[in-house]
Amino acid sequence: QVHLVESGGGLVQAGGSLRLSCAASGRTFSNYAMGWFRRAPGKEREFVATISWSGHSTDYADSVKGRFTISRDNAKNTVYLQMNSLKPEDTAVYYCAASGTTTMPYRQSEYGYWGQGTQVTVSS
């Protein structure tokens, strides 16, 4: 079992930045690829970013590429999402997730563990 807790959400003006953190506990964190997803009001949850267990490989949704950066610190059992140049359309609940089965998971079904989410609101 892997327990995930997100933090760092909040209210920010358009163009601003936030850094989300996801602290993991339970099984060996470095065995898991990690991802960030988000659910905007009235929409389905969507993929944002993924990072391999080592941190050497990352990938992003086109909508955030060049603005968001996913990283991890395996010594601290934490994955981060640095969000820059935020837009109102980035407003959503952001979830981190862990996958023990796939090197670079993109689909929600590839993740076995989820956090409770943290709200990010970007004002125009």
Image: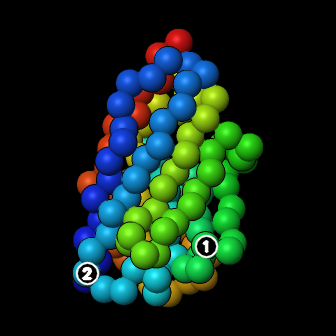
Q: Residue furthest front?
A: 75
Q: Is the image coloured rainbow, by chain, by secondary structure, or in one colour?
A: rainbow
Residue 85: mark = none
- The x and y percentages for residue 54 are 59, 80
In this rendering, position of residue 73 left or right of residue 3:
right
Q: Amino acid at mark 1?
A: Gly
Query: How many marks do you count on the picture?
Result: 2
| Residues at marks 2 and 1, CA–CA distance in whole angstroms | 19 Å
Residue drawn at x 46%, y 87% is 31
Residue 59 lies, in percent from the top left, at 68, 62
| Residue that numbered label 1 is attached to | 55
Instruction: Check disc 2 and report its element: helix, strand or loop.
Output: strand
Neighbourhood count class around disc 2 (C-alpha, 10 Å): few under 14, some 14–19, many 20 upward? few
Residue 29 versus residue 44: which sits nearer the camera? 29
Q: Is residue 91 above or below residue 108?
A: above
Judging by the rendered image, the residue that carries numbered circle 2 is: 26
**Which label's residue is closer to the chain start, 2 or 1?**
2
Quarter of the image for the N terminus: give it. bottom left
| Residue 100 in sight | yes
